[in-house]
Image (cartoon, rainbow, N blue to C red):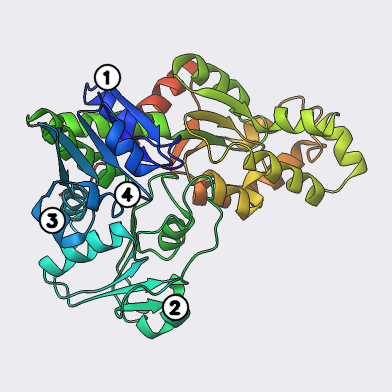
Amino acid sequence: MYGLIGKNISHSFSKKIHNFFENNNYELFNVENLKNFINNNYLSGYNVTMPYKTEIIPLIDKLDKISAATNSVNTVIKKRKKLYGYNTDYYGFSKLIEFNNIQIENKKVLILGNGSVAKTVCYYLKNNNVKTCTKLVRNIKSENDILYDNFNDFNDYEIIINTTPVGMYPNNDDDLLVDIKKFNILEVVIDLIYNPLKTKLLLEAENQNIKAVNGLLMLLMQAKKAHELFFNQKVSFELTKEIYFKLLDELYNIVLIGLPLSGKSKYAKVLNKKMNKSLYDSDDEIKKIIEMTISEYFENKSEDDFREVETDIIKKVYKENNYIISTGGGIIKHKKNMDLLQQNGIIIFLNKDANIIAKKDIKGRPLIKNSQDILFLAKERLPLYKKYSNIIINIDQSIEYHIKEIKEKINEYINNQWPKY
């Protein structure tokens, strides 16, 4: 039997990943008393996560070189009643850097946090000739730690790496630790969080046209190395790549945006039958909350009031994974909505010609009283649909044709997430 030990780990992806590696005897263990668990568990090997990566070291009989150097253990194997500790985070981080072709030699690197992962990251960076490795922290633990309040002193740094849980599920909306707009020559932002797939920090980096990298590949690669240690066998990169795609396929939400009457609800229902994902229609959810039709709501309230309700509805689903989300036509008017949906979503714009929509007999649409209204909405909203979309589908064929096109483009998008190295 194998597993992951730590605290508050019910949402960890580790069980899923090790099951993909065909280890079906892998479970999650929420541990309150570490010493008691170590002395009484029946596991042949296990991974270690927060807050025990350093605390476990006095209980280990023998450490590998990297664990000893970093004072951090995340993999333990039991052999002949002795415990052997390893640090596979180092391997995982090395592959994240290598596969994403991130140049670190002679670079100034700012690390957010000073926990066990920060130690591993800094150790790797120093072994690979970075110019400077500086840690920004909330609580100073060593003479090399510097408080976050002083981050403006480092605006000439080229790489930022977040090793803290700030912005991690379920606290996706945490305030950012630093303002990356203040950095003059920033090249790369790495957030070792993998849930959500795009943290607020990474989305801000993308908004600034800065390369943004999440921690999913590091998680997968450290698990690969741990699996190899557990079973004394090599795992191919091809299998690891396949697992990466499987993970993304299950983690991504599919978010449909587009003009009213462009077919979002219809396409969401068909996709729901074709894909192993849950269905979430934001307009249907809004009607449950307001207990009336959306047209009736607009007769009594303003559009701004409606957008606030819409945001509340999006907040109920954006942190989740593996959903198909059909949105209202005006969802893109509120930047907050799109910031939330982008965290775990592939945004697909169903681009149906507004002139075709205008020929329909339009009823029950509060912002569309005549054909000219839909043309006005199109002029206002098309730039926003295009801005936020990852995939654009020009709706001019049968629904069967476009469902096939959507699935193909989703697969292409996911396949392109594998780093080109």
- The residue sitting at 86% across, 37% down in the picture is 297
Name of the residue lying farthest toward the bottom: 153
Q: Which residue is mark 1?
A: 24
Distance (Cα) linking label 3 and label 2: 34 Å
- Contact (CB < 8 A) between labels 1 and 4? no
Q: Which residue is mark 3?
A: 66
- The residue sitting at 40% across, 59% down in the picture is 164
Asked whether residue 183 appears in the rendered view, the answer is no
Residue 292 in the figure: left or right of residue 183: right
Distance (Cα) linking label 3 and label 4: 20 Å
In what element is the residue under mark 1?
loop
* Viewer-side residue, 153 vs 363: 153
For marks 3 and 1, give the one nearer the viewer: 3
- The residue sitting at 11% across, 71% down in the picture is 129
Q: Which residue is mark 4?
A: 215
In what element is the residue under mark 4?
loop
